[in-house]
Amino acid sequence: MSEGKRVGVVGAGMGGIAAAALMQRAGFDVVLYDQAPSFMRLGAGIQFGPNVMKILRRLDLEAPLEAVSCLPDYWTSRNWDDGAILANIPLNAERERYKAAYITIHRGDLQQTMLNAVDPARVQFGKQLTRFEDNGKTVRLDFADGTSDTVDILVAADGINSRIREQIFGLDAAVYTGWVAHRAIIPGAAAKAVGADVNAKWWSADRHIVCYYLDRNEDEFYLVTGEPDEWTSASGQLPSTREALRKSFEGYHPMVQAYIDATTEVTKWPLKTRNPLPHWHQGRVVLLGDACHPMKPHMAQGAAMAVEDAAVLTRCLAELGTQDLERSFRTYFACRKDRATKVQRISNANTWLRQPEDPFWCYGDDVYQMDLRAVEAT
Ligand code: FAD
């Protein structure tokens, strides 16, 4: 092995896939492991801003993603009962300014398209990491199926309940925020029949519902909420009902009621977070995405931050090298901590784009413009 170039990425969510693909292109020998038995198409939507699309461009994913996703010109914030417009924020209407598109897409389509950028021979499903051992030179990975592997660098992209974070920082349950998200997909035609913004968030004092198309043909329309509720289950998601959704959004505008009437399958998710960590690495092991900074999803930037982490981490390892990992990982943390923590704070506060504001600091960012050595020197 390897000159320090064999990397194990644990977790094939958006952050892990991006890390594996970008590191492969940078010349690293990468294996991507996930505990799932195979790729699973989760029934949900996701928004990716220009800040992420500029990274995915480097993986030649921009054109294939734009071909299948919806490209909203505006983000519209509406008042819950009378539908009054609170804010109308240009997205693709200002594409030249952001230097990339803003897309909304089915999560399964996004994940599968991103996975196509990773060498399939280097992706291993059915590999649940149970523990690792870092001997200072290599890292041994033990999996639940009794197999093990040895790598030079371990990247923890294993999400909010990261086993790797737990082994480094100790067992510490994620914090339930007191909020849940209902999710449902309805036919695009049903949304069109009542009238629909391409991408809107309807706000009342203590809850909201976000509604957008998932595809270029506007065949599917996605509803995702944020609302206070109890959560006692150990499960990460539960089936819910149209009636429960109706009750939560009683009194909302007739357009929202009509969307809810068109739902068939409704699920409910607990929204969890964690306090910021003091560092994101230890020895030859480094964390990214929800493994180190999970957040409530109200800026639609959680996966975006995971992909940005992956890009900056790849840059640090490629440009600063793997001989002095402490230096490369410290620079990665210094580059990412303030931005990820800011996004985490605003997301958790659920204030993003409720009123007119300029989101350029977030969407206009390009991680490839960052001067790593200048950050390192500060
Ligand atoms: P994950 O996506 O959680 O992936 C972790 C992976 O690790 C999983 O595949 C899992 O199977 C695997 N894994 C876990 N443990 C192990 C183990 N021990 N061994 C092997 N594999 C393991 N973000 C956006 O950018 N835009 C949005 O529009 C958006 N909307 C959201 C809406 C909702 C309702 C929610 C809840 C979140 C939303 N997010 C959004 C946030 C986003 O989903 C997360 O921030 C993102 O998925 C984190 O990516 P990740 O790669 O860090 O982790």
Image (cartoon, rainbow, N blue to C red):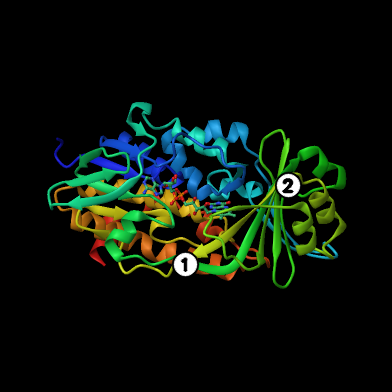
Q: Look at label 1 and name its amino acid.
A: Lys
The answer, for residue 35, to whether it is visible in the render is yes
> Dot 1: few (<14), some (14–19), or many (≥20) neighbours within 10 Å?
few
Q: Position of residue 152 (x, y in %)?
A: 19, 44
Per the image, the residue denoted by label 2 is 198
Tag 1–tag 2 contact (CB < 8 Å): no
Q: Position of residue 196 (x, y in %)?
A: 80, 48
As helix, strand or loop, the secondary structure at mark 1 comes to: helix
Examine the rendered structure and indicate whether residue 290 appears above or below residue 169: above
- Quadrant containing the C terminus in the rendered view: bottom left
Tag 2 or tag 1, which sits nearer the N-term?
Answer: 2
As helix, strand or loop, the secondary structure at mark 2 comes to: loop
The answer, for residue 26, to whether it is visible in the render is no
Q: Residue at x 17, y 42 (%)?
A: 4
> Dot 2: few (<14), some (14–19), or many (≥20) neighbours within 10 Å?
many
Q: Residue furthest bottom?
A: 205
Q: Is mark 1 within 8 Å of ligand 1?
A: no
Instruction: Give residue 17's quadrant in the image.
Output: top left
Q: Nearer the viewer, residue 224 or 195?
A: 224
Q: Position of residue 94 (x, y in %)?
A: 62, 49
Q: Residue at x 47, y 36 (%)?
A: 114
Per the image, the residue denoted by label 1 is 342
Q: Position of residue 61 (x, y in %)?
A: 48, 34
Q: Residue at x 63, y 65 (%)?
A: 357
Q: Is mark 2 within 8 Å of ligand 1?
A: no
- Quadrant containing the N terminus in the rendered view: top left
